[in-house]
Amino acid sequence: MNQEENVKHLIGEWEHGAMNRREFFERALFLLGSVTAAEALLAACSPAAAPAATALPSVAPAATATAVPTVAPTVAPTRPPQPTNPPPLPPVTSRIPGFVDASAVDTSQVTYSSGDVKMMAYLAKPKSGGPWPGVIVIHENRGLTDHIKDVTRRIANLGYAALGVDLLSRLGGTPKFDPPADPTQAINSLKQEDVNADLVASAAFLKAQSFVKPKLGSVGFCWGGHNSIQAAIRSKDVVACVIFYGRNPAPIDDVQQIAGATIGNYGDQDQGITPGVPALDAAMKKYNKPFEYKIYPGANHAFFNDTGPRFHEASAKDAWARLVDFYKKQLA
């Protein structure tokens, strides 16, 4: 990767809470070679909303510990009475937008071709009925994680055939990049034209299934948010595009190729993405493309990811409700 790509990769890790301020600064200093430049980059990446370093409790070395003689108590301590039926704790899943148990939908691993590449994907659909509209689900820069598979099942539970694509397929697939391997570096090595071809192949595969109606939607998060709109630009079958904090297409005039409608969800603390939204809105208006977006106060990049440090429950639930309503209207 060149320096610009390395810096983008560093910012992506920072936005996902993968490091603290000191680690970010040290890596920025190594890349940029200047304290001033490193400090400027840190300031530009919304330091007020960045994850703080975790303070670890200090423990005295065993060799210096003072031995204290143990004295048996003369009276046994009285244990407070325990309730026989303690009140149940609220389920964590109540915080997750659209949560559905994995058994509620049918899932399978599927493969298909994109030129000479064997694409891999996670397919989820309702247990009965059909055919259903299809939705392409596009992952963040961590690959097709368990979280994105979970989101794919949530969308299937709404009454759609959902395809969670693995856009690391041409590099061997997401499982190849389990720790200590870094999927973000692999993602950054992909060429956009190759990703576009894989998105078109994914739309074609989904549309060709007997249980899928002709209209398709797309949804993506972070890196996938950018590629959600790329899917709508490249495939006329994608008529309902949902963006979660994805960067704008380049060139932005490519939006004139979109066949349907688009909505976007952004956080006001996301200084790497949200300032570019007015330019996208202007381009959509220029080419008469339906586009509505919402910027959530107090939310940062990756606010929908309930497995990450920036999950913002109220914003995530509202954005999910927007997605549900949007697909009902556009994919009916």
Image (cartoon, rainbow, N blue to C red):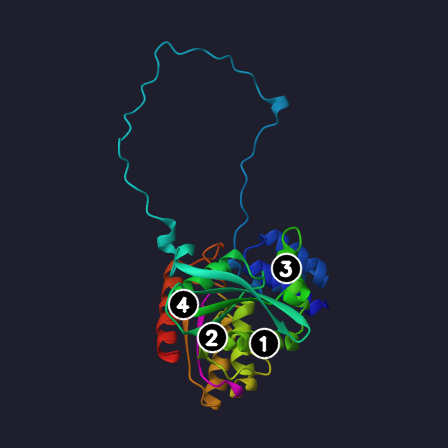
Of marks 3 and 4, which one's residue comes earlier in the chain?
3
* Amino acid type, callout 1: Ala
Residue beneath disc 2: 210
Q: Which mark is residue 83?
A: none
Q: Which residue, given by chain and number where applicable, does mark 3 sit on?
A: 183
Numbered badge on residue 201: 1
Which residue: 66% across, 76% down?
115
Are there few (<14), some (14-19), or many (20+) residues within 10 Å of tag 3? many
Measured Cα–Cα span from mark 2 to mark 3 = 33 Å
Residue 193 lies in the magenta-colored region: no
Q: Secondary structure at mark 4?
A: strand
Residue 116 spot, x, y in % from top left = 69, 73
Question: Mark 1, residues whose alpha carbon is within 10 Å: few (<14), some, or many (≥20)?
Answer: some
Is the residue 65 above or below the residue 37 in the image? above
For marks 1 and 4, give the CA distance. Answer: 33 Å
Q: Earlier in the sequence, mark 2 or mark 1?
A: 1
